[in-house]
Image: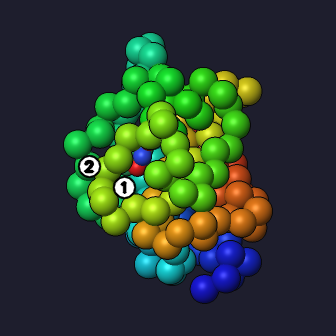
Amino acid sequence: MTFEELKPHVVEIFENKSNLLKLNDCLLQVCELLEANVPHYNWVGFYFKNGDKDELKLNAYVGEPTDHTIIPFGKGICGQVAVSNKNFVVPDVTMQDNYIACSITVKAEIVIPIFVNGENIGQIDIDSNTPNPFTEADERFLEFVCSLVSKILS
Ligand code: SME
């Protein structure tokens, strides 16, 4: 499915009233939709700031289970995005010093922050087993997904 074709499906997940009662189910459905329909998305998950701690906590995800359910701010690609407030596209994870490996099959990663009222409250994290797979189209699409998450959290 193309990103344009996927967008209405993501919107539908967030518009479903019964889902609105359960944010975690919504997020899981988004992970499932993306992993199943974008060939270069092999692990899809959401991390959120863990209360008032300077760390991220894994919420919904699809893919191999990871030991990294808590990531301190500044550590790894995810922890860096928690402090930079910027998209982080990694075409080749072996080129990153500050990287937390979850699986040896992962070649590339993209992390897009989620903002609520200007505050960076979490992120979507995607791992790919394909080298250098991400383009600006991924960034724009994932920003769209993050804006929908932000809307239901505002
Ligand atoms: N690789 C991430 C850790 C999370 S996993 O990809 C699921 C990082 O460096 O922050």
Q: Secondary structure at mark 1?
A: strand
Three-letter amino acid code at the position of disc 1: Tyr
Q: Residue at x 68, y 75 (%)?
A: 3
Relative horizontal placement of residue 8, taking residue 26 as reference (left or right): right
Relative horizontal placement of residue 3, taking residue 132 as reference (left or right): right
Q: Nearer the viewer, mark 1 or mark 2?
A: 2
For label 2, count other residues whose C-alpha is less than 10 Å away and answer few (under 14), some (14-19) or many (20+). Answer: few
Could you say which is closer to the camera, residue 29 or residue 103?
103
Check the image and name the residue furthest to the bottom.
Answer: 1
Q: Residue at x 35, y 47 (%)?
A: 101
Q: Residue at x 53, y 48 (%)?
A: 95
Where is residue 77 drawn, in percent x and y?
51, 39
For label 1, count other residues whose C-alpha is less than 10 Å away and answer few (under 14), some (14-19) or many (20+). Answer: many
Circles 1 and 2, Cβ within 8 Å, touching? The answer is yes
Up/down of 51 relative to 12, above or below: above
Where is residue 88 drawn, in percent x and y?
64, 45
Could you say which is closer to the camera, residue 91 or residue 140?
91
Which residue is denoted by mark 1 in the rendering?
61
Three-letter amino acid code at the position of disc 2: Thr
Quarter of the image where one finds residue 139: bottom right
